[in-house]
Image (tube, rainbow, N blue to C red):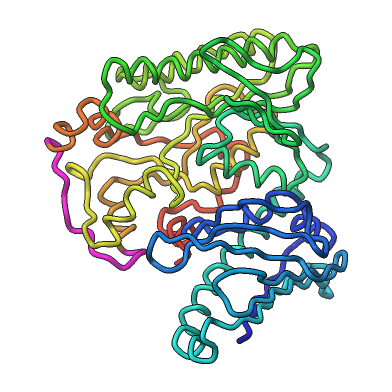
Amino acid sequence: MIFKKVCRIKAPVEEVFEWHERSGALERLSPPWDPLEVISKGPGIDEGTRVEMYIKAGPLPVKIKWIAEHTLYEKNRMFQDRQVKGPFKRWIHTHTFTTDDGGETVLEDRIDYALPLHPLGNLFGGRSIKKKLERIFRYRHATTARDLVDHLSRQDQKPLHILMSGAGGVVGSSLIPFFTTGGHRVTRLVRRKPLKNENERFWDPQKGILDIEDTDSFDVVIHLSGENIGQGRWSPEKKRKIIESRNKTTALIARHISRMAKPPEVFLSASAIGFYGDRGDEVMTEENECGTDFISGVCSQWENAAIPALEKGIRVVFLRIGVVLSPVGGALQRLLPSFKMGLGGKVGSGGQYMSWISMDDLIGTVYHAINDESLSGPVNIVAPAPVSNLELTRTLGKVISRPALFTIPAWLIKLLFGEMGQEILLASTRVKPEKILAAGYRFRHPDLEGALLHLLGK
């Protein structure tokens, strides 16, 4: 059987081909509703290089090992990979790059495949496989095209060297492939012995250890690490971990980079819209003051911990991040199982506002904040159209074609989760991304339904 998918990309063919050659392309192209897990891979896409990965097969949580080998390669024209081991009887994937009369790149993905027990496998499973491939490659082409637009808009920019904490989390592991496919280098902070031949540095915030030298050179520092606030009740010990995991780490990084002979141009430190607290229907912008909730105080202290970097004159951006939508992790991942079973519904009254952002727009706004020198201080990282919990419930049910009729009463949330449930699940925070909009950022997914359709491949 043959599957073909063609798209046009507003970029030179050399740029599109090189994007596919760079580290992170495979991860960036992996659809978030059906992500792959890379075990090992050779450098580039030259003939003979191999990739080993786990993929999920069917609705059950079963992993299958897939080994692919690149078999043909012609710079700026085509490359091909074939399955060595995996779920198909035959799989040959040819990527072809040509230039049309208008100078745009025409990218064609052609897959020659056969299912197990061919021809019976193709007869009974062919239709569902073609439908799945259509979803995957629609996502891949859209991601490739928009990423290249973002990177090429900064063509005069030198390749950046980025130091990142929290690189193994949902946000960090999504940011890194975006940066590396754009030609940038990311060094990850890790709390174990750094691996050889990897861009890793050791740190131990509890002991005040950060393995960077005053003579090191980083263009950008992105700080994302912190204790998960959405898991379990907030016991006194949990609260201590939430506070210390943010204050100690931020202060440690800020002190070290402020002592560097050549400090980074910009320090992006994660914060959260929890800074504003439970504010009902009131619209929050970066000008609003801190709320009075526990998490508001945490965010305020978190941001204040970066003062050494500010005093050094480093441009500091506090990323006040909203509810990040991704089926790989976070709120959406937790909601999907019950919604798919038809058991989804609103939380409490459903009237509380949820200021959300798609993972792609989180990546886009972070990249914009790096490059736009007008941005400093707090920047709200949310989509321009916050929704009520009820609207989120109805929209998610619509996108996955399931009813969403249930209600989780507020009293039950408070009983099960206590203060965490009150501040995270029941609080209303209606936030406007005023500064990022004024800086000219154009959202990939400004409305919730469009974001969910893209993220879930619908």
Dividing the picture into quadrants, the one containing residue 280 is top left
Q: Residue at x 30, y 17 (%)?
A: 292
- Report the front residue among 454 and 368: 454
Looking at the image, residue 116 lies above or below residue 334? below
Extreme residue toward the right, this view:
75
Looking at the image, residue 11 lies above or below residue 324? below
Dividing the picture into quadrants, the one containing residue 188 is top right
Q: Position of residue 275 (x, y in %)?
A: 40, 23
Dividing the picture into quadrants, the one containing residue 218 is top right
- Report the front residue among 156 and 399: 399
The magenta span reads 398-411
Quarter occupied by the N terminus? bottom right
The answer to whether any part of residue 310 appears in the image is no
Q: Left or right: where does residue 260 sit relative to residue 228? A: right
Q: Position of residue 443 (x, y in %)?
A: 55, 49
Looking at the image, residue 130 lies above or below residue 413? below
Q: Position of residue 42 (x, y in %)?
A: 75, 53
Q: Residue at x 51, y 63 (%)?
A: 64
Looking at the image, residue 292 lies above or below residue 20? above
Q: Is residue 408 magenta?
A: yes
Q: Left or right: where does residue 139 sit relative to residue 372? A: left
Q: How many marks?
A: 0
Q: Is residue 263 magenta?
A: no
The answer to whether any part of residue 24 appears in the image is yes
Q: Position of residue 337 (x, y in %)?
A: 31, 56
Q: Residue at x 51, y 86 (%)?
A: 117
Quarter occupied by the C terminus? bottom left
Q: Residue at x 29, y 28 (%)?
A: 278
